[in-house]
Image: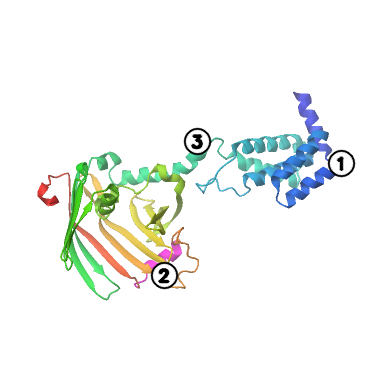
Amino acid sequence: MKKCILLLSLLLTVGMQGQDAVTLLKFEEAEKAFNSGDYRAVIEKLAEVEAGIGVTSKTLYLKIMAQNQLLGAENKVFTDPSTTLDFTLLRSLLENTQTYINAMKEQGLDDRFREVHNIHEKLKAYPKTEAELKNIYTKPFVETIDKYYASIGGQEDIANVETMVVEENQENDFNSQYVENYSSTIITKKAIGKYSLSIEGPHGSKTVFNKEKGVYKGILFTSNFEHTKKLYDKLTSNSLSLVSVLPFNMDDVQSLKIRQGSFSGEEATIVNQQQEVNSTNYSVNYYFSNTSGRLIGTVTSLKGGVVTIIRFTDFREVKGLTFPFKRITKTYQLSEHGKEGYNYEEGLGDEKLALLMEQDNYMSSIINTTTRLKINEPIPESVFE
Protein backbone atom coordinates (compact mmCIF):
# COMPACT_ATOMS: atom_id res chain seq x y z
CA MET A 1 0.00 0.00 0.00
CA LYS A 2 2.84 2.40 0.92
CA LYS A 3 4.54 1.65 -2.42
CA CYS A 4 1.32 2.55 -4.27
CA ILE A 5 1.03 5.87 -2.44
CA LEU A 6 4.71 6.63 -3.10
CA LEU A 7 4.33 5.82 -6.80
CA LEU A 8 1.23 8.03 -7.05
CA SER A 9 3.07 10.83 -5.28
CA LEU A 10 5.95 10.56 -7.75
CA LEU A 11 3.59 10.61 -10.72
CA LEU A 12 1.79 13.65 -9.37
CA THR A 13 4.99 15.60 -8.88
CA VAL A 14 6.30 14.75 -12.35
CA GLY A 15 3.75 16.95 -14.12
CA MET A 16 3.67 16.83 -17.94
CA GLN A 17 7.39 17.21 -18.60
CA GLY A 18 8.95 14.78 -21.06
CA GLN A 19 5.67 13.50 -22.48
CA ASP A 20 5.23 12.71 -26.16
CA ALA A 21 3.56 15.15 -28.56
CA VAL A 22 0.28 13.17 -28.77
CA THR A 23 -0.13 13.21 -25.00
CA LEU A 24 0.63 16.93 -24.83
CA LEU A 25 -1.87 17.57 -27.62
CA LYS A 26 -4.63 15.71 -25.77
CA PHE A 27 -3.86 17.67 -22.62
CA GLU A 28 -4.07 20.92 -24.58
CA GLU A 29 -7.46 19.81 -25.90
CA ALA A 30 -8.60 19.22 -22.31
CA GLU A 31 -7.46 22.75 -21.36
CA LYS A 32 -9.29 24.24 -24.35
CA ALA A 33 -12.45 22.35 -23.39
CA PHE A 34 -12.17 23.76 -19.86
CA ASN A 35 -11.79 27.32 -21.13
CA SER A 36 -14.85 26.87 -23.35
CA GLY A 37 -16.91 25.48 -20.44
CA ASP A 38 -17.24 21.92 -21.77
CA TYR A 39 -16.30 20.27 -18.47
CA ARG A 40 -17.45 16.77 -19.37
CA ALA A 41 -15.17 16.85 -22.40
CA VAL A 42 -12.34 17.87 -20.07
CA ILE A 43 -12.78 14.71 -18.02
CA GLU A 44 -13.01 12.55 -21.16
CA LYS A 45 -9.80 14.03 -22.61
CA LEU A 46 -7.96 13.67 -19.29
CA ALA A 47 -9.00 10.02 -19.11
CA GLU A 48 -7.26 9.46 -22.46
CA VAL A 49 -4.15 11.24 -21.19
CA GLU A 50 -4.04 9.29 -17.92
CA ALA A 51 -4.59 6.00 -19.75
CA GLY A 52 -1.20 6.49 -21.31
CA ILE A 53 0.92 8.18 -18.65
CA GLY A 54 -1.03 7.73 -15.42
CA VAL A 55 -2.19 10.46 -13.03
CA THR A 56 -0.03 13.60 -12.82
CA SER A 57 -0.36 16.74 -10.75
CA LYS A 58 -1.57 18.68 -13.79
CA THR A 59 -4.15 16.14 -14.92
CA LEU A 60 -5.54 15.68 -11.43
CA TYR A 61 -5.68 19.43 -10.78
CA LEU A 62 -7.52 20.07 -14.05
CA LYS A 63 -9.89 17.18 -13.36
CA ILE A 64 -10.70 18.61 -9.91
CA MET A 65 -11.41 22.04 -11.41
CA ALA A 66 -13.71 20.52 -14.05
CA GLN A 67 -15.55 18.32 -11.53
CA ASN A 68 -16.01 21.32 -9.24
CA GLN A 69 -17.66 23.22 -12.08
CA LEU A 70 -19.91 20.27 -12.92
CA LEU A 71 -20.97 19.98 -9.30
CA GLY A 72 -21.60 23.70 -9.21
CA ALA A 73 -18.83 25.94 -7.95
CA GLU A 74 -21.45 28.22 -6.42
CA ASN A 75 -23.86 25.42 -5.50
CA LYS A 76 -26.81 26.72 -3.47
CA VAL A 77 -27.22 23.43 -1.68
CA PHE A 78 -27.74 25.15 1.67
CA THR A 79 -30.12 27.87 0.47
CA ASP A 80 -32.20 26.61 -2.45
CA PRO A 81 -34.55 23.63 -1.97
CA SER A 82 -34.65 23.05 -5.73
CA THR A 83 -30.91 22.28 -5.78
CA THR A 84 -29.93 18.75 -6.76
CA LEU A 85 -26.66 16.97 -6.16
CA ASP A 86 -24.80 14.31 -8.17
CA PHE A 87 -23.59 12.22 -5.23
CA THR A 88 -21.38 10.01 -7.43
CA LEU A 89 -19.62 13.12 -8.71
CA LEU A 90 -19.40 14.52 -5.18
CA ARG A 91 -17.72 11.37 -3.86
CA SER A 92 -15.26 11.32 -6.79
CA LEU A 93 -14.37 14.98 -6.27
CA LEU A 94 -13.82 14.45 -2.54
CA GLU A 95 -11.57 11.49 -3.29
CA ASN A 96 -9.58 13.39 -5.93
CA THR A 97 -9.07 16.46 -3.76
CA GLN A 98 -7.90 14.27 -0.87
CA THR A 99 -5.50 12.41 -3.19
CA TYR A 100 -4.05 15.69 -4.46
CA ILE A 101 -3.62 17.04 -0.92
CA ASN A 102 -1.92 13.87 0.33
CA ALA A 103 0.48 13.73 -2.61
CA MET A 104 1.36 17.43 -2.84
CA LYS A 105 1.43 18.60 0.79
CA GLU A 106 5.21 18.06 1.02
CA GLN A 107 5.88 20.06 -2.17
CA GLY A 108 5.20 23.45 -0.59
CA LEU A 109 2.24 25.81 -0.64
CA ASP A 110 1.17 27.30 -3.96
CA ASP A 111 -2.05 28.72 -5.40
CA ARG A 112 -3.12 25.37 -6.86
CA PHE A 113 -2.73 23.55 -3.55
CA ARG A 114 -4.59 26.33 -1.76
CA GLU A 115 -7.45 26.17 -4.30
CA VAL A 116 -7.79 22.37 -4.09
CA HIS A 117 -7.67 22.50 -0.29
CA ASN A 118 -10.44 25.13 -0.20
CA ILE A 119 -12.64 23.00 -2.46
CA HIS A 120 -12.05 19.94 -0.27
CA GLU A 121 -12.94 21.81 2.94
CA LYS A 122 -16.11 23.18 1.35
CA LEU A 123 -17.22 19.75 0.18
CA LYS A 124 -16.72 18.17 3.60
CA ALA A 125 -19.78 20.08 4.78
CA TYR A 126 -21.94 18.84 1.90
CA PRO A 127 -24.60 16.16 2.47
CA LYS A 128 -23.45 12.72 1.38
CA THR A 129 -26.90 11.16 0.80
CA GLU A 130 -30.36 12.20 -0.40
CA ALA A 131 -31.62 11.91 3.18
CA GLU A 132 -28.96 14.31 4.43
CA LEU A 133 -29.74 16.70 1.57
CA LYS A 134 -33.44 16.71 2.44
CA ASN A 135 -32.64 17.31 6.10
CA ILE A 136 -30.79 20.52 5.19
CA TYR A 137 -34.03 21.96 3.85
CA THR A 138 -36.45 20.47 6.34
CA LYS A 139 -34.55 21.35 9.52
CA PRO A 140 -35.18 25.14 9.49
CA PHE A 141 -38.83 24.60 8.53
CA VAL A 142 -39.31 22.00 11.27
CA GLU A 143 -37.78 24.34 13.83
CA THR A 144 -39.91 27.30 12.68
CA ILE A 145 -43.16 25.32 12.56
CA ASP A 146 -42.54 23.56 15.90
CA LYS A 147 -41.77 26.89 17.56
CA TYR A 148 -44.92 28.42 16.05
CA TYR A 149 -47.27 25.71 17.27
CA ALA A 150 -45.63 25.71 20.71
CA SER A 151 -46.16 29.48 20.93
CA ILE A 152 -49.92 29.21 20.45
CA GLY A 153 -50.59 26.18 22.66
CA GLY A 154 -49.34 23.08 20.86
CA GLN A 155 -50.57 21.04 17.90
CA GLU A 156 -52.40 18.50 20.07
CA ASP A 157 -54.60 21.14 21.73
CA ILE A 158 -55.25 22.82 18.37
CA ALA A 159 -56.33 19.48 16.89
CA ASN A 160 -58.81 19.09 19.75
CA VAL A 161 -60.70 22.25 18.77
CA GLU A 162 -64.03 20.99 17.44
CA THR A 163 -66.14 24.14 17.59
CA MET A 164 -65.33 27.82 17.53
CA VAL A 165 -67.41 30.99 17.72
CA VAL A 166 -65.70 34.24 16.76
CA GLU A 167 -67.50 37.56 17.18
CA GLU A 168 -65.72 40.53 15.70
CA ASN A 169 -66.09 44.06 14.42
CA GLN A 170 -64.77 45.02 11.02
CA GLU A 171 -63.93 48.50 9.77
CA ASN A 172 -63.40 48.91 6.03
CA ASP A 173 -61.65 52.05 4.79
CA PHE A 174 -61.47 52.37 1.01
CA ASN A 175 -58.64 54.87 0.54
CA SER A 176 -60.38 57.27 2.94
CA GLN A 177 -63.16 57.78 0.37
CA TYR A 178 -65.77 56.00 2.43
CA VAL A 179 -65.82 53.79 5.50
CA GLU A 180 -68.07 50.82 6.25
CA ASN A 181 -68.46 49.12 9.60
CA TYR A 182 -69.65 45.55 10.11
CA SER A 183 -70.08 43.13 12.94
CA SER A 184 -69.84 39.43 12.21
CA THR A 185 -70.16 36.08 13.87
CA ILE A 186 -68.18 33.16 12.52
CA ILE A 187 -69.13 29.69 13.72
CA THR A 188 -67.27 26.54 12.70
CA LYS A 189 -67.97 22.95 13.60
CA LYS A 190 -64.99 21.00 12.36
CA ALA A 191 -66.12 17.46 13.08
CA ILE A 192 -68.90 17.57 10.49
CA GLY A 193 -67.68 20.45 8.33
CA LYS A 194 -70.32 23.00 9.30
CA TYR A 195 -69.73 26.70 8.95
CA SER A 196 -71.80 29.83 9.45
CA LEU A 197 -70.87 33.46 8.78
CA SER A 198 -73.35 36.17 9.70
CA ILE A 199 -72.53 39.77 8.76
CA GLU A 200 -74.45 42.80 10.00
CA GLY A 201 -73.85 46.08 8.22
CA PRO A 202 -74.62 48.02 5.00
CA HIS A 203 -74.49 44.79 2.99
CA GLY A 204 -75.43 42.24 5.60
CA SER A 205 -75.50 38.57 4.66
CA LYS A 206 -75.33 35.05 5.96
CA THR A 207 -73.31 32.18 4.52
CA VAL A 208 -73.91 28.64 5.76
CA PHE A 209 -72.33 25.26 5.17
CA ASN A 210 -74.44 22.37 6.39
CA LYS A 211 -73.04 18.96 5.54
CA GLU A 212 -73.14 18.76 1.72
CA LYS A 213 -74.96 21.97 0.83
CA GLY A 214 -74.13 25.62 1.11
CA VAL A 215 -76.29 28.72 0.88
CA TYR A 216 -75.62 32.44 0.67
CA LYS A 217 -78.41 34.79 1.79
CA GLY A 218 -77.83 38.44 0.94
CA ILE A 219 -79.96 41.55 0.76
CA LEU A 220 -80.43 41.28 -2.98
CA PHE A 221 -80.37 37.54 -3.63
CA THR A 222 -80.00 34.04 -2.28
CA SER A 223 -77.87 31.38 -3.94
CA ASN A 224 -77.09 27.75 -3.29
CA PHE A 225 -73.71 26.17 -3.92
CA GLU A 226 -72.18 22.73 -3.69
CA HIS A 227 -70.14 21.73 -0.66
CA THR A 228 -66.48 21.09 -1.46
CA LYS A 229 -63.49 20.86 0.84
CA LYS A 230 -61.65 23.51 -1.19
CA LEU A 231 -64.53 25.95 -0.80
CA TYR A 232 -64.93 25.12 2.88
CA ASP A 233 -61.22 25.77 3.48
CA LYS A 234 -61.47 29.08 1.63
CA LEU A 235 -64.42 30.22 3.73
CA THR A 236 -62.92 29.20 7.04
CA SER A 237 -59.60 30.84 6.14
CA ASN A 238 -61.33 34.15 6.81
CA SER A 239 -61.84 33.18 10.42
CA LEU A 240 -59.39 33.11 13.27
CA SER A 241 -59.62 29.34 13.34
CA LEU A 242 -57.25 28.99 10.39
CA VAL A 243 -54.74 31.45 11.82
CA SER A 244 -53.76 28.55 14.07
CA VAL A 245 -53.27 26.10 11.20
CA LEU A 246 -50.53 26.90 8.71
CA PRO A 247 -51.39 26.65 4.98
CA PHE A 248 -48.32 24.50 4.33
CA ASN A 249 -46.57 21.51 5.84
CA MET A 250 -43.36 19.54 5.44
CA ASP A 251 -44.62 17.95 2.22
CA ASP A 252 -44.34 21.42 0.65
CA VAL A 253 -40.68 22.00 1.55
CA GLN A 254 -39.39 21.75 -2.02
CA SER A 255 -41.65 24.64 -3.06
CA LEU A 256 -40.88 26.87 -0.06
CA LYS A 257 -38.03 29.24 0.66
CA ILE A 258 -36.88 30.46 4.05
CA ARG A 259 -34.75 33.41 5.13
CA GLN A 260 -34.21 35.85 7.97
CA GLY A 261 -35.63 39.39 7.93
CA SER A 262 -37.91 41.70 9.85
CA PHE A 263 -41.54 42.73 10.03
CA SER A 264 -42.80 45.94 11.63
CA GLY A 265 -39.45 46.38 13.40
CA GLU A 266 -39.34 42.83 14.77
CA GLU A 267 -36.76 40.22 13.69
CA ALA A 268 -38.51 37.35 11.95
CA THR A 269 -38.10 34.11 10.03
CA ILE A 270 -39.72 34.47 6.61
CA VAL A 271 -41.27 31.53 4.78
CA ASN A 272 -42.05 32.23 1.12
CA GLN A 273 -44.72 30.24 -0.73
CA GLN A 274 -45.60 30.53 -4.43
CA GLN A 275 -49.27 30.10 -5.33
CA GLU A 276 -51.55 30.25 -8.34
CA VAL A 277 -55.30 30.85 -8.25
CA ASN A 278 -57.42 31.29 -11.37
CA SER A 279 -54.27 31.70 -13.52
CA THR A 280 -53.04 34.50 -11.24
CA ASN A 281 -49.53 34.03 -9.89
CA TYR A 282 -48.59 35.46 -6.53
CA SER A 283 -46.39 34.79 -3.55
CA VAL A 284 -46.99 34.95 0.19
CA ASN A 285 -44.35 35.70 2.80
CA TYR A 286 -45.20 34.43 6.30
CA TYR A 287 -43.38 36.27 9.10
CA PHE A 288 -42.71 34.31 12.29
CA SER A 289 -41.35 36.25 15.26
CA ASN A 290 -37.88 35.06 16.24
CA THR A 291 -38.70 36.00 19.82
CA SER A 292 -42.14 34.47 20.38
CA GLY A 293 -42.43 32.10 17.41
CA ARG A 294 -45.88 33.50 16.59
CA LEU A 295 -47.10 34.36 13.11
CA ILE A 296 -47.05 38.17 13.25
CA GLY A 297 -47.78 39.01 9.64
CA THR A 298 -48.16 38.02 6.01
CA VAL A 299 -47.36 39.86 2.80
CA THR A 300 -49.04 38.77 -0.43
CA SER A 301 -47.43 40.07 -3.64
CA LEU A 302 -49.07 39.94 -7.07
CA LYS A 303 -47.26 40.19 -10.37
CA GLY A 304 -48.82 43.57 -11.23
CA GLY A 305 -47.49 45.28 -8.12
CA VAL A 306 -50.48 44.83 -5.82
CA VAL A 307 -49.31 44.09 -2.28
CA THR A 308 -51.50 43.06 0.69
CA ILE A 309 -50.03 43.28 4.19
CA ILE A 310 -51.71 41.64 7.20
CA ARG A 311 -50.53 42.32 10.75
CA PHE A 312 -51.60 40.07 13.63
CA THR A 313 -51.61 41.82 17.00
CA ASP A 314 -53.21 41.82 20.45
CA PHE A 315 -52.51 38.16 21.23
CA ARG A 316 -54.67 36.66 23.97
CA GLU A 317 -55.06 33.23 25.51
CA VAL A 318 -58.38 31.35 25.37
CA LYS A 319 -58.56 27.91 26.96
CA GLY A 320 -54.82 27.40 26.68
CA LEU A 321 -54.58 28.55 23.05
CA THR A 322 -53.24 31.93 21.91
CA PHE A 323 -54.97 33.92 19.18
CA PRO A 324 -54.48 37.38 17.65
CA PHE A 325 -57.53 39.46 18.53
CA LYS A 326 -56.71 42.09 15.94
CA ARG A 327 -55.90 41.79 12.23
CA ILE A 328 -54.96 44.84 10.19
CA THR A 329 -55.12 44.27 6.43
CA LYS A 330 -53.89 46.93 4.00
CA THR A 331 -53.69 46.65 0.23
CA TYR A 332 -51.38 48.83 -1.84
CA GLN A 333 -50.79 49.41 -5.54
CA LEU A 334 -47.09 50.04 -6.04
CA SER A 335 -46.17 53.13 -8.06
CA GLU A 336 -43.86 52.82 -11.05
CA HIS A 337 -41.03 54.01 -8.82
CA GLY A 338 -42.04 51.52 -6.15
CA LYS A 339 -41.89 48.67 -8.68
CA GLU A 340 -38.18 49.24 -9.31
CA GLY A 341 -36.37 46.07 -8.27
CA TYR A 342 -39.73 44.49 -7.36
CA ASN A 343 -39.93 40.72 -7.80
CA TYR A 344 -43.32 39.39 -6.79
CA GLU A 345 -41.95 35.85 -6.45
CA GLU A 346 -39.61 36.95 -3.67
CA GLY A 347 -42.01 39.49 -2.19
CA LEU A 348 -40.91 42.85 -0.86
CA GLY A 349 -37.50 43.19 0.70
CA ASP A 350 -37.33 44.31 4.34
CA GLU A 351 -36.47 47.92 3.49
CA LYS A 352 -39.22 48.34 0.87
CA LEU A 353 -41.73 46.67 3.18
CA ALA A 354 -40.87 48.98 6.07
CA LEU A 355 -41.24 52.06 3.84
CA LEU A 356 -44.57 50.84 2.46
CA MET A 357 -46.00 50.19 5.92
CA GLU A 358 -45.23 53.78 6.90
CA GLN A 359 -47.35 55.15 4.04
CA ASP A 360 -51.08 55.89 4.06
CA ASN A 361 -51.69 55.76 0.30
CA TYR A 362 -53.32 52.33 0.49
CA MET A 363 -56.13 51.12 -1.74
CA SER A 364 -58.06 49.67 1.18
CA SER A 365 -57.70 49.04 4.89
CA ILE A 366 -59.62 46.42 6.86
CA ILE A 367 -59.37 46.19 10.65
CA ASN A 368 -60.86 43.11 12.29
CA THR A 369 -61.19 43.26 16.06
CA THR A 370 -62.37 40.18 17.95
CA THR A 371 -64.84 40.98 20.70
CA ARG A 372 -65.49 37.41 21.86
CA LEU A 373 -63.99 34.01 21.16
CA LYS A 374 -65.50 30.74 22.38
CA ILE A 375 -63.92 27.31 21.93
CA ASN A 376 -65.58 23.87 22.24
CA GLU A 377 -68.90 25.17 23.52
CA PRO A 378 -72.25 23.69 22.42
CA ILE A 379 -73.61 25.13 19.17
CA PRO A 380 -77.32 24.82 18.30
CA GLU A 381 -78.09 23.35 14.89
CA SER A 382 -80.31 26.32 14.08
CA VAL A 383 -77.27 28.51 13.31
CA PHE A 384 -76.56 26.36 10.26
CA GLU A 385 -79.97 26.88 8.72
Residue 235: image x %, image y %? 25, 54
SS at badge 2: loop
| Highlighted magenta segment, given as a residue range | 350-360
Q: Which mark is residue 187?
A: none
Q: Nearer the viewer, residue 114 or 334?
A: 334
Q: Residue 148 versus residue 306: which sits nearer the camera? A: 306
Q: Secondary structure at mark 1?
A: helix
Q: Nearer the viewer, mark 1 or mark 3?
A: 1
Measure how far apart labels 3 and 2 are at the Cα level. Answer: 42 Å
Q: Residue at the location (33% across, 50% down)?
A: 294
Asked if disc 1 and disc 2 are in contact, CB closer than 8 Å, the reply is no
Residue beneath disc 1: 22
- Residue located 46% across and 45% down the image: 254
Check disc 3 and report its element: helix, strand or loop: helix
On the image, the x and y values in percent for residue 344 come to 45, 61
Task: Using the numbered discs, state the Cα–Cα distance from disc 1 to disc 2 in whole angstroms.
Answer: 64 Å
From what the image shows, is residue 63 above or below residue 362?
Answer: above
Q: Could you tell me which residue is drawn at 61 percent across and 50 percent down?
A: 74
Sooner in the amino-acid sequence: mark 3 or mark 2: 3
Res. 198 visible in picture: no
Residue 149 in the image: x percent, y percent? 32, 44
Tell me which numbered mark, 1 or 3, is placed earlier along the sequence: 1
Q: Which residue is mark 3?
A: 131
For badge 1, the amino acid type reads Val
Report if residue 355 lies within the magenta region.
Answer: yes
Say which of marks 1 and 2 sits in front.
1
Determine whether 172 is above or below 322 in the image: below
What residue sits right under mark 2 in the picture? 334
Q: Residues within 10 Å of mark 3 (few under 14, many from 20)?
A: few
The x and y percentages for residue 360 are 34, 72
